[in-house]
Amino acid sequence: MSEIEPIVGRYLRLTLDGRPHRVYFEEAGEGIPLVCLHTAGADGRQWRHLLNDADVTRHYRVLAFDMPWHGKSLPPVGWQDEEYRLTSAAYVDMVMAFVRALGLARPVVMGCSIGGKIVLELARLHAGELRALIGLEAADYQAPWYDDTSWLHRPDVHGGEVCGAMMSGLIAPQSPAESRWDTLWMYMQGGPGVFRGDLHFYRAEDFRSRVATIGTPGCPLYLLTGEYDFSCTPEDTHRTAKALPGVSVTVMTEIGHFPMSENPARFRRYILPVLEEIRAPG
């Protein structure tokens, strides 16, 4: 059988940090804008199941973009003469530039891993412009469980296969083989040094002194973490939430670090009630 999926892909020209970029994004659905942020070293394909979910797209306009250097978003001109390193300031500016360029009125932003972590900074700096924030595998700080990442960018090592092997342990054992390998394939395709540059943000940026200044009224914050995630553990998320009165915390059983791509059927059991609550009157 042949079928055309409802997902539409487009390019958006943006100026980020004073430099022109061509950012690829996919979208589906109508209603409340829902901007989805992928994990380190991957791209927006992680959200394809959500983009194809009619129970979501009936009420939400779901948008997932590839960060520059990732997926179909090329690096800026001159990339060959620099080292890619993600920072929280650049990440926040990128998300808000995307939101404003598309004229998204008070969108919901949902991110996973590095995308979940930056949700905390968006809550601190831009809550007034957003309807709600959802952090998957999110915490104010994660103690690194790996050592030097230089092996991710060496001419004698296949960085993609190393990335895939590294991430395989973060997927829950109950996740189906098909979606497990889909998730790992995205990591195997990353550009040289990109995963390493994302991990710089993940391990070097410590938000523990910042979360206490986050105010949640008017922009609810939801934190959902997989029970099998040893990168951002449920304990990390609970610790973060202690500084954020009123924040909802959910530990997702039989899920690891990539809920939306490793086990989309189980993930929707957790995310659909959250999305329903966000769009409910009052």
Image (cartoon, rainbow, N blue to C red):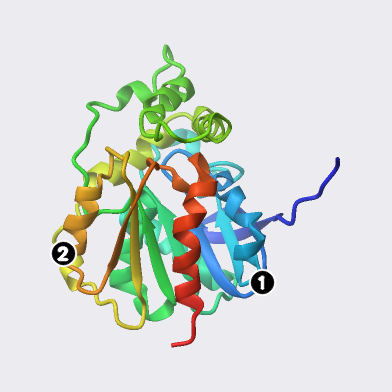
Name the one closer to the observer, 59 or 22: 59
Name which of mark 2 and mark 1 comes first in the sequence.
1
State left or right for residue 57 relative to residue 147: right
Residue 173 vs 205, above or below: the answer is above
Residue 204 locus on image (x, y percent):
22, 44
Residue 255 vs 148, above or below: the answer is below
Name the one closer to the observer, 145 or 236: 236
Residue 139 locus on image (x, y percent):
25, 53
Q: Secondary structure at mark 1?
A: loop
The residue singled out by tag 1 in the image is: 30
Mark 1: amino acid: Glu
Kindly indicate the quadrant of the structure image that contains residue 33. Answer: bottom right
Mark 2: amino acid: Lys
Residue 149 locus on image (x, y percent):
30, 27
Within 10 Å of disc 2 (Cα), the crowding (few <14, some 14-19, many 20+) is: few
Taking the image as drawn, is residue 271 in sight? yes
From this viewpoint, which residue is outermost toward the bottom? 282
